[in-house]
Image (cartoon, rainbow, N blue to C red):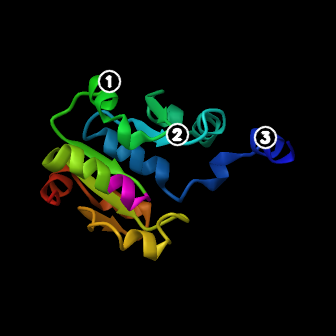
Amino acid sequence: MEVSYFLMDYHFANRLFPCSLDVVERFKQFGEAAILSDGDMIFQPLKVERSGLREAVDGKVMIYIHKENELDDVEARYPADHYVLIDDKVRILDAVKKAWGARVTTVFPRQGHYAADSKETAKYPTPDVTVDRIDQLLEYDLTRLVAATS
């Protein structure tokens, strides 16, 4: 209960990586931006809301138990010729690449505790784009991202 109450009052905006919201704004210039997340159905929406990410994507947030299994729903909600998926879990990037192939550019920022697990990341193919920090994506334009797609 103590942990639950702590999380209910936590200021998640303080936990965003530097320039995360700037990256969202930049990518909105390329097309529709949405959050595709997974996790606890109580705390994950709270984290997205309190961090400012929900507002940054104009409320376009999808949260699933296993997001990689919900790609048909993602496509139905946000149809596109090409997607750019940024995730710190290469397992997710690999699953989405297998499903969408050349229709998705997978982007792996090496930040966060999932990204730091070198044994786990070594199990999967290299994503299309890898950056050390999320703010490095400010240097990318859509042409460069799509060109990186393998």
- Residue reaching furthest right? 2
Question: Which mark, by number, is residue 129?
Answer: none
The quarter holding residue 31 reads: top left
Tell me: 57 left or right of 95.
right
Q: Earlier in the sequence, mark 3 or mark 1?
A: 3
* Residue carrying label 3: 9
Q: Position of residue 55 (x, y in %)?
A: 52, 32
> Which segment did they paint magenta?
88-93
Residue drawn at x 40%, y 54% is: 87
Amino acid bearing label 2: Leu
* 47 w.r.t. 18: above or below: above
Residue 90 included in the magenta stretch of the image: yes
Q: Earlier in the sequence, mark 1 or mark 2?
A: 2
Tell me: 19 left or right of 128.
right
* Residue carrying label 1: 77
Q: Position of residue 63 (x, y in %)?
A: 49, 34
Q: CA distance from mark 3 to mark 1?
A: 31 Å
Q: Position of residue 25 (x, y in %)?
A: 39, 43
Helix, strand or loop under label 3: loop
Mark 3 or 1: in front is: 1
Amino acid bearing label 3: Asp
Quadrant occupied by the C terminus = bottom left
Q: Does the residue at mark 3 contact the one at mark 1 (Cβ under 8 Å)? A: no
Question: Which mark, by number, is residue 53?
Answer: 2
Amino acid bearing label 1: Arg
Question: Few, some or many C-alpha atoms within 10 Å of disc 1 (few <14, some 14-19, many ≥20)?
Answer: few
* 118 w.r.t. 83: above or below: below
Mark 2 or 3: in front is: 3
